Image (cartoon, grey):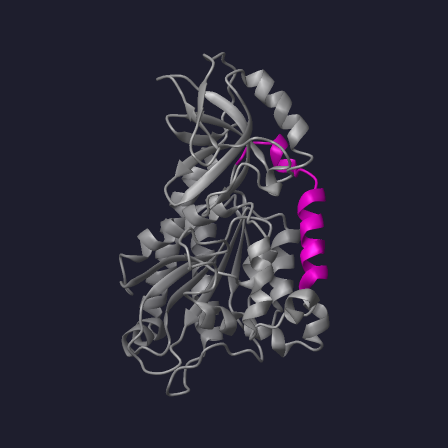
Amino acid sequence: MKSFLRLLPAVTAALFIAISMPVTAKDNRTMNLTKVVIDPGHGGHDAGCISRDKKTYEKNLTLDISKRFAEKIRAAYPDIEVIMTRADDRYVTLSGRADIANNANADLFISIHINAQSKGTAANGYSIHCLGQSREKGNDLFSKNLELCKRENSVIKLEDDYQTKYQGFDPSDPQSYIFFSLMQNAHLEQSLMFAEDVAGAMKKGPIRRSRGVSQDPFWVLWRTTMPSVLIEVGFITNPEDLQTMRSADGRDKIAQNLLDAFTTFKKRYDGTMRVEKTEQPREAATQDETGLSSVEVPSGSVLYGTQVLATGRRMSENDAFFRGNKPVEVSSGKLFKYVIGVSSDIEEARKEYRRLRSAFPESFFVRIEEGKTERVK
Protein backbone atom coordinates (compact mmCIF):
# COMPACT_ATOMS: atom_id res chain seq x y z
CA MET A 1 0.00 0.00 0.00
CA LYS A 2 2.86 2.40 0.75
CA SER A 3 4.15 1.86 -2.80
CA PHE A 4 0.74 2.70 -4.18
CA LEU A 5 0.39 5.82 -2.05
CA ARG A 6 3.78 7.03 -3.28
CA LEU A 7 2.46 6.67 -6.81
CA LEU A 8 -0.75 8.63 -6.29
CA PRO A 9 0.80 11.90 -7.56
CA ALA A 10 1.84 10.16 -10.78
CA VAL A 11 -1.59 8.60 -11.21
CA THR A 12 -3.36 11.89 -10.55
CA ALA A 13 -1.11 13.77 -12.97
CA ALA A 14 -1.59 11.17 -15.69
CA LEU A 15 -5.36 11.21 -15.29
CA PHE A 16 -5.36 15.02 -15.44
CA ILE A 17 -3.32 14.97 -18.65
CA ALA A 18 -5.67 12.42 -20.19
CA ILE A 19 -8.71 14.52 -19.31
CA SER A 20 -7.29 17.92 -20.27
CA MET A 21 -5.29 17.00 -23.37
CA PRO A 22 -6.56 19.00 -26.37
CA VAL A 23 -7.75 17.31 -29.52
CA THR A 24 -4.80 17.03 -31.89
CA ALA A 25 -4.57 18.37 -35.40
CA LYS A 26 -5.18 14.85 -36.69
CA ASP A 27 -8.90 15.43 -36.17
CA ASN A 28 -8.77 18.07 -38.91
CA ARG A 29 -6.80 16.26 -41.60
CA THR A 30 -6.81 13.04 -43.52
CA MET A 31 -6.18 10.08 -41.26
CA ASN A 32 -2.93 8.67 -42.66
CA LEU A 33 0.03 7.04 -40.97
CA THR A 34 2.82 9.51 -41.66
CA LYS A 35 5.21 9.19 -38.72
CA VAL A 36 6.58 6.15 -36.86
CA VAL A 37 9.02 5.90 -33.96
CA ILE A 38 11.23 2.80 -33.72
CA ASP A 39 12.75 2.20 -30.30
CA PRO A 40 15.79 -0.13 -30.09
CA GLY A 41 15.72 -1.46 -26.53
CA HIS A 42 18.53 -0.69 -24.05
CA GLY A 43 21.88 0.87 -25.13
CA GLY A 44 25.01 2.43 -23.69
CA HIS A 45 25.77 1.19 -20.18
CA ASP A 46 22.49 -0.76 -20.28
CA ALA A 47 23.39 -3.93 -22.19
CA GLY A 48 20.00 -5.58 -21.75
CA CYS A 49 20.02 -9.39 -21.82
CA ILE A 50 23.35 -11.14 -22.45
CA SER A 51 23.94 -14.52 -24.08
CA ARG A 52 25.19 -17.41 -21.96
CA ASP A 53 28.66 -17.18 -23.52
CA LYS A 54 28.76 -13.43 -22.75
CA LYS A 55 29.53 -12.61 -26.39
CA THR A 56 26.20 -11.13 -27.54
CA TYR A 57 24.32 -8.19 -26.01
CA GLU A 58 20.65 -7.42 -26.49
CA LYS A 59 21.39 -3.73 -27.08
CA ASN A 60 23.40 -4.54 -30.22
CA LEU A 61 20.83 -6.93 -31.69
CA THR A 62 17.93 -4.55 -31.13
CA LEU A 63 19.83 -1.66 -32.71
CA ASP A 64 20.74 -3.65 -35.82
CA ILE A 65 17.21 -5.02 -36.33
CA SER A 66 15.73 -1.56 -35.73
CA LYS A 67 18.04 0.07 -38.26
CA ARG A 68 17.20 -2.55 -40.89
CA PHE A 69 13.49 -2.11 -40.16
CA ALA A 70 13.76 1.68 -40.40
CA GLU A 71 15.57 1.53 -43.74
CA LYS A 72 12.97 -0.86 -45.14
CA ILE A 73 10.17 1.53 -44.19
CA ARG A 74 12.01 4.48 -45.73
CA ALA A 75 12.59 2.54 -48.95
CA ALA A 76 8.98 1.34 -49.19
CA TYR A 77 7.35 4.59 -48.00
CA PRO A 78 9.51 7.66 -48.77
CA ASP A 79 6.79 9.97 -47.46
CA ILE A 80 6.77 8.43 -43.98
CA GLU A 81 9.00 10.02 -41.36
CA VAL A 82 10.89 7.35 -39.41
CA ILE A 83 12.35 8.43 -36.06
CA MET A 84 14.77 6.31 -34.02
CA THR A 85 14.95 6.81 -30.25
CA ARG A 86 18.63 5.94 -30.64
CA ALA A 87 20.72 5.35 -33.76
CA ASP A 88 23.90 4.28 -31.98
CA ASP A 89 25.11 2.70 -28.74
CA ARG A 90 23.81 5.26 -26.29
CA TYR A 91 21.62 5.11 -23.20
CA VAL A 92 18.13 6.63 -23.37
CA THR A 93 15.81 6.64 -20.35
CA LEU A 94 12.39 5.03 -20.57
CA SER A 95 10.73 8.40 -20.13
CA GLY A 96 13.09 9.86 -22.73
CA ARG A 97 12.02 7.24 -25.29
CA ALA A 98 8.36 8.02 -24.72
CA ASP A 99 9.04 11.76 -24.84
CA ILE A 100 10.65 11.41 -28.27
CA ALA A 101 7.51 9.75 -29.62
CA ASN A 102 5.10 12.11 -27.87
CA ASN A 103 6.94 15.28 -28.88
CA ALA A 104 7.02 14.09 -32.48
CA ASN A 105 3.25 13.46 -32.41
CA ALA A 106 3.96 10.04 -33.91
CA ASP A 107 1.26 7.74 -35.26
CA LEU A 108 2.90 4.50 -34.10
CA PHE A 109 5.55 3.50 -31.53
CA ILE A 110 7.43 0.20 -31.90
CA SER A 111 9.89 -0.93 -29.22
CA ILE A 112 12.25 -3.79 -30.19
CA HIS A 113 13.62 -6.13 -27.51
CA ILE A 114 15.17 -9.57 -26.98
CA ASN A 115 13.86 -11.96 -24.32
CA ALA A 116 15.82 -14.17 -21.89
CA GLN A 117 15.19 -17.13 -19.61
CA SER A 118 16.52 -16.76 -16.07
CA LYS A 119 17.30 -20.50 -15.80
CA GLY A 120 17.75 -23.01 -18.59
CA THR A 121 17.76 -22.57 -22.36
CA ALA A 122 14.51 -24.20 -23.50
CA ALA A 123 12.31 -21.10 -23.78
CA ASN A 124 12.20 -19.71 -27.31
CA GLY A 125 10.08 -17.73 -29.73
CA TYR A 126 8.74 -14.21 -30.14
CA SER A 127 6.02 -12.33 -28.26
CA ILE A 128 4.23 -9.03 -28.74
CA HIS A 129 3.02 -6.83 -25.88
CA CYS A 130 0.54 -3.97 -25.51
CA LEU A 131 -0.50 -2.00 -22.47
CA GLY A 132 -3.90 -2.98 -21.15
CA GLN A 133 -5.97 -5.36 -19.09
CA SER A 134 -6.68 -8.98 -19.87
CA ARG A 135 -10.34 -9.96 -20.19
CA GLU A 136 -9.65 -13.20 -18.28
CA LYS A 137 -10.29 -13.30 -14.55
CA GLY A 138 -7.14 -13.78 -12.51
CA ASN A 139 -5.00 -12.74 -15.47
CA ASP A 140 -4.91 -8.99 -15.02
CA LEU A 141 -1.95 -7.15 -16.43
CA PHE A 142 1.27 -8.69 -15.20
CA SER A 143 0.24 -12.14 -13.91
CA LYS A 144 1.68 -13.97 -16.93
CA ASN A 145 4.73 -11.84 -17.59
CA LEU A 146 5.65 -10.26 -14.27
CA GLU A 147 9.30 -11.29 -14.47
CA LEU A 148 9.58 -9.96 -18.03
CA CYS A 149 7.96 -6.66 -17.01
CA LYS A 150 10.23 -6.35 -13.99
CA ARG A 151 13.30 -6.87 -16.17
CA GLU A 152 12.31 -4.43 -18.92
CA ASN A 153 11.21 -1.79 -16.41
CA SER A 154 14.27 -2.32 -14.20
CA VAL A 155 16.40 -0.08 -16.43
CA ILE A 156 14.76 2.74 -14.49
CA LYS A 157 17.14 1.86 -11.65
CA LEU A 158 20.13 2.78 -13.82
CA GLU A 159 19.06 6.42 -13.64
CA ASP A 160 20.22 8.75 -10.91
CA ASP A 161 17.51 9.52 -8.35
CA TYR A 162 15.05 7.27 -10.19
CA GLN A 163 12.61 7.19 -7.24
CA THR A 164 12.08 10.92 -7.57
CA LYS A 165 11.94 10.96 -11.39
CA TYR A 166 9.48 8.08 -11.51
CA GLN A 167 7.53 9.29 -8.45
CA GLY A 168 8.00 6.24 -6.26
CA PHE A 169 7.60 3.53 -8.89
CA ASP A 170 9.67 0.46 -7.97
CA PRO A 171 9.94 -2.01 -10.87
CA SER A 172 10.74 -4.87 -8.48
CA ASP A 173 7.67 -4.32 -6.28
CA PRO A 174 4.41 -5.87 -7.58
CA GLN A 175 2.40 -3.30 -5.58
CA SER A 176 3.86 -0.55 -7.75
CA TYR A 177 2.02 -2.03 -10.73
CA ILE A 178 -1.39 -1.35 -9.19
CA PHE A 179 -1.50 2.08 -10.77
CA PHE A 180 -1.36 0.62 -14.28
CA SER A 181 -4.78 -0.92 -13.68
CA LEU A 182 -6.19 2.56 -13.07
CA MET A 183 -5.24 3.73 -16.54
CA GLN A 184 -6.98 2.95 -19.81
CA ASN A 185 -4.98 2.85 -23.02
CA ALA A 186 -6.83 5.14 -25.40
CA HIS A 187 -5.08 3.44 -28.31
CA LEU A 188 -5.56 -0.15 -27.20
CA GLU A 189 -7.64 -1.15 -30.20
CA GLN A 190 -5.04 -0.09 -32.77
CA SER A 191 -2.17 -1.34 -30.60
CA LEU A 192 -3.73 -4.80 -30.49
CA MET A 193 -4.38 -4.71 -34.23
CA PHE A 194 -0.74 -3.99 -34.98
CA ALA A 195 0.35 -6.60 -32.44
CA GLU A 196 -1.74 -9.21 -34.26
CA ASP A 197 -0.26 -8.06 -37.58
CA VAL A 198 3.24 -8.59 -36.16
CA ALA A 199 2.30 -12.01 -34.78
CA GLY A 200 1.00 -13.06 -38.20
CA ALA A 201 4.03 -11.77 -40.12
CA MET A 202 6.56 -13.33 -37.74
CA LYS A 203 5.12 -16.82 -38.28
CA LYS A 204 7.03 -16.94 -41.57
CA GLY A 205 10.28 -17.33 -39.64
CA PRO A 206 13.18 -17.39 -39.17
CA ILE A 207 12.02 -17.71 -35.55
CA ARG A 208 8.71 -19.49 -35.92
CA ARG A 209 7.41 -20.13 -32.42
CA SER A 210 4.80 -17.61 -31.34
CA ARG A 211 4.35 -16.95 -27.64
CA GLY A 212 1.33 -14.83 -28.47
CA VAL A 213 0.07 -11.31 -27.91
CA SER A 214 -0.42 -10.17 -24.33
CA GLN A 215 -1.24 -7.02 -22.40
CA ASP A 216 1.35 -6.03 -19.81
CA PRO A 217 2.48 -3.01 -17.75
CA PHE A 218 5.60 -1.80 -19.55
CA TRP A 219 6.38 1.76 -18.46
CA VAL A 220 7.40 2.93 -21.92
CA LEU A 221 4.06 1.81 -23.39
CA TRP A 222 2.11 3.51 -20.63
CA ARG A 223 3.90 6.82 -21.26
CA THR A 224 3.29 6.96 -25.02
CA THR A 225 0.24 8.71 -26.47
CA MET A 226 -0.23 6.73 -29.67
CA PRO A 227 -0.68 3.07 -30.67
CA SER A 228 2.33 1.31 -29.13
CA VAL A 229 3.74 -2.19 -28.99
CA LEU A 230 6.81 -3.86 -27.48
CA ILE A 231 8.18 -6.83 -29.44
CA GLU A 232 10.43 -9.53 -27.98
CA VAL A 233 11.78 -11.01 -31.23
CA GLY A 234 13.41 -14.11 -29.67
CA PHE A 235 15.33 -15.53 -26.71
CA ILE A 236 19.01 -14.69 -26.38
CA THR A 237 19.32 -17.65 -23.98
CA ASN A 238 18.04 -20.17 -26.54
CA PRO A 239 20.76 -21.60 -28.85
CA GLU A 240 18.55 -21.72 -31.97
CA ASP A 241 17.06 -18.26 -31.49
CA LEU A 242 20.50 -16.85 -30.72
CA GLN A 243 22.03 -18.41 -33.83
CA THR A 244 19.32 -16.79 -35.92
CA MET A 245 19.75 -13.38 -34.32
CA ARG A 246 23.54 -13.52 -34.64
CA SER A 247 23.10 -14.02 -38.38
CA ALA A 248 22.80 -10.89 -40.53
CA ASP A 249 20.38 -12.79 -42.74
CA GLY A 250 18.28 -13.78 -39.73
CA ARG A 251 18.09 -10.20 -38.46
CA ASP A 252 17.19 -8.97 -41.94
CA LYS A 253 14.35 -11.49 -42.22
CA ILE A 254 13.02 -10.38 -38.84
CA ALA A 255 13.13 -6.75 -40.03
CA GLN A 256 11.33 -7.76 -43.23
CA ASN A 257 8.58 -9.45 -41.20
CA LEU A 258 8.17 -6.26 -39.21
CA LEU A 259 7.87 -4.31 -42.45
CA ASP A 260 5.20 -6.73 -43.70
CA ALA A 261 3.25 -6.21 -40.47
CA PHE A 262 3.70 -2.44 -40.77
CA THR A 263 2.39 -2.54 -44.36
CA THR A 264 -0.72 -4.45 -43.28
CA PHE A 265 -1.36 -2.05 -40.43
CA LYS A 266 -0.79 1.06 -42.55
CA LYS A 267 -3.30 -0.05 -45.17
CA ARG A 268 -5.93 -0.51 -42.48
CA TYR A 269 -4.96 2.69 -40.66
CA ASP A 270 -5.10 4.81 -43.81
CA GLY A 271 -8.51 3.39 -44.68
CA THR A 272 -10.24 4.21 -41.42
CA MET A 273 -11.39 7.75 -42.25
CA ARG A 274 -14.54 8.15 -44.31
CA VAL A 275 -16.79 11.11 -45.06
CA GLU A 276 -20.46 10.24 -44.67
CA LYS A 277 -23.71 12.16 -44.80
CA THR A 278 -26.74 9.93 -44.98
CA GLU A 279 -29.99 9.51 -43.15
CA GLN A 280 -30.65 6.09 -41.67
CA PRO A 281 -33.59 4.36 -39.97
CA ARG A 282 -33.87 4.71 -36.22
CA GLU A 283 -32.19 1.97 -34.26
CA ALA A 284 -33.83 -0.46 -31.86
CA ALA A 285 -32.05 -0.86 -28.53
CA THR A 286 -32.30 -3.61 -25.97
CA GLN A 287 -30.68 -4.17 -22.61
CA ASP A 288 -28.99 -7.32 -21.38
CA GLU A 289 -28.66 -8.49 -17.79
CA THR A 290 -25.70 -6.14 -17.18
CA GLY A 291 -27.82 -3.09 -17.98
CA LEU A 292 -25.70 -2.21 -21.01
CA SER A 293 -27.44 -1.22 -24.20
CA SER A 294 -26.99 -3.54 -27.13
CA VAL A 295 -27.99 -2.22 -30.51
CA GLU A 296 -30.08 -4.12 -33.02
CA VAL A 297 -29.41 -2.49 -36.39
CA PRO A 298 -31.78 -3.28 -39.27
CA SER A 299 -29.96 -4.89 -42.20
CA GLY A 300 -28.26 -2.26 -44.36
CA SER A 301 -28.64 0.56 -41.84
CA VAL A 302 -25.91 2.53 -40.09
CA LEU A 303 -25.54 4.22 -36.70
CA TYR A 304 -23.10 6.93 -35.63
CA GLY A 305 -21.56 7.88 -32.31
CA THR A 306 -18.49 8.78 -30.24
CA GLN A 307 -16.17 5.90 -29.36
CA VAL A 308 -14.61 6.67 -25.99
CA LEU A 309 -12.98 3.38 -25.01
CA ALA A 310 -11.71 0.02 -26.26
CA THR A 311 -10.72 -2.44 -23.55
CA GLY A 312 -10.24 -6.14 -22.93
CA ARG A 313 -12.55 -6.03 -19.91
CA ARG A 314 -16.30 -5.58 -19.98
CA MET A 315 -17.40 -2.37 -18.29
CA SER A 316 -20.54 -1.53 -16.34
CA GLU A 317 -22.74 1.20 -17.81
CA ASN A 318 -22.50 2.98 -14.44
CA ASP A 319 -18.69 3.04 -14.44
CA ALA A 320 -17.38 6.50 -13.51
CA PHE A 321 -15.29 6.51 -16.69
CA PHE A 322 -18.42 7.27 -18.77
CA ARG A 323 -19.29 10.33 -16.65
CA GLY A 324 -23.00 9.67 -16.60
CA ASN A 325 -23.31 8.94 -20.33
CA LYS A 326 -25.01 5.66 -21.25
CA PRO A 327 -22.62 3.64 -23.43
CA VAL A 328 -23.43 1.24 -26.24
CA GLU A 329 -21.18 -1.82 -26.23
CA VAL A 330 -19.81 -3.26 -29.47
CA SER A 331 -17.94 -6.55 -29.11
CA SER A 332 -14.97 -6.97 -31.45
CA GLY A 333 -12.92 -10.13 -30.97
CA LYS A 334 -11.02 -9.73 -27.70
CA LEU A 335 -12.13 -6.12 -27.29
CA PHE A 336 -15.20 -4.36 -25.98
CA LYS A 337 -15.72 -0.98 -27.64
CA TYR A 338 -17.87 1.65 -25.95
CA VAL A 339 -19.74 4.28 -27.96
CA ILE A 340 -21.86 7.11 -26.55
CA GLY A 341 -24.08 9.70 -28.19
CA VAL A 342 -25.37 7.09 -30.66
CA SER A 343 -27.88 8.10 -33.32
CA SER A 344 -28.95 7.10 -36.82
CA ASP A 345 -28.81 10.81 -37.74
CA ILE A 346 -25.18 11.63 -38.57
CA GLU A 347 -25.58 15.36 -37.89
CA GLU A 348 -27.15 14.73 -34.50
CA ALA A 349 -24.34 12.31 -33.64
CA ARG A 350 -21.71 14.83 -34.81
CA LYS A 351 -23.26 17.47 -32.59
CA GLU A 352 -22.93 15.11 -29.65
CA TYR A 353 -19.33 14.34 -30.61
CA ARG A 354 -18.44 18.04 -30.54
CA ARG A 355 -19.95 18.22 -27.06
CA LEU A 356 -18.31 15.06 -25.78
CA ARG A 357 -14.77 15.38 -27.04
CA SER A 358 -13.79 17.98 -24.44
CA ALA A 359 -14.58 15.44 -21.73
CA PHE A 360 -13.12 12.54 -23.77
CA PRO A 361 -10.15 14.09 -25.62
CA GLU A 362 -8.99 10.75 -27.07
CA SER A 363 -12.44 9.89 -28.44
CA PHE A 364 -13.31 9.78 -32.13
CA PHE A 365 -16.36 9.69 -34.37
CA VAL A 366 -17.44 6.27 -35.64
CA ARG A 367 -20.09 4.52 -37.68
CA ILE A 368 -21.59 1.24 -36.49
CA GLU A 369 -22.59 -1.19 -39.20
CA GLU A 370 -23.02 -4.97 -39.14
CA GLY A 371 -21.75 -5.14 -35.57
CA LYS A 372 -18.50 -3.31 -36.40
CA THR A 373 -17.20 0.20 -35.74
CA GLU A 374 -15.32 2.27 -38.28
CA ARG A 375 -13.71 5.65 -37.77
CA VAL A 376 -15.31 8.50 -39.73
CA LYS A 377 -13.90 11.92 -40.54
What residue appears at the point 39 percent right and 60 percent down from the top-left corner? 255
Magenta span: helix, strand or loop, mainly? helix
Asked if the stretch drawn in magenta spans residue 32, the answer is no
Where 243 falls versus 324 (above or below)? below
User: Is 149 on the left-hand or right-hand side of 91?
Assistant: left
Work out whether residue 81 or residue 287 is closer to the camera in this orientation and state it: 287
Work out whether residue 77 or residue 358 is closer to the camera in this orientation and state it: 358
Range of the magenta residues? Answer: 7-31
Q: Residue furthest bottom?
A: 53
Residue 117: image location, x then y, percent: 38, 77
Residue 293: image location, x then y, percent: 47, 29
User: Which quadrant holds residue 115?
Assistant: bottom left
Where 129 falls versus 375 (above or below)? below
What residue appears at the point 48 percent right and 33 percent down from the top-left corner? 292
Work out whether residue 340 or residue 223 is closer to the camera in this orientation and state it: 340
Where 147 falls versus 263 (above or below)? below
User: Which quadrant holds residue 44?
Assistant: bottom right
Where 228 falls versus 348 (above or below)? below
What residue appears at the point 40 percent right and 53 percent down from the top-left corner? 136
The total number of labels drawn is: 0
What residue appears at the point 68 percent right and 70 percent down from the top-left corner? 168
Residue 32: image location, x then y, percent: 52, 37
Residue 79: image location, x then y, percent: 52, 43
- Residue 166 visible within the image: yes
User: Is 238 on the left-hand or right-hand side of 288?
Assistant: left
- Residue 90 visible within the image: no
Which quadrant of the figure contains the N terminus?
bottom right
Which quadrant of the figure contains the C terminus?
top right
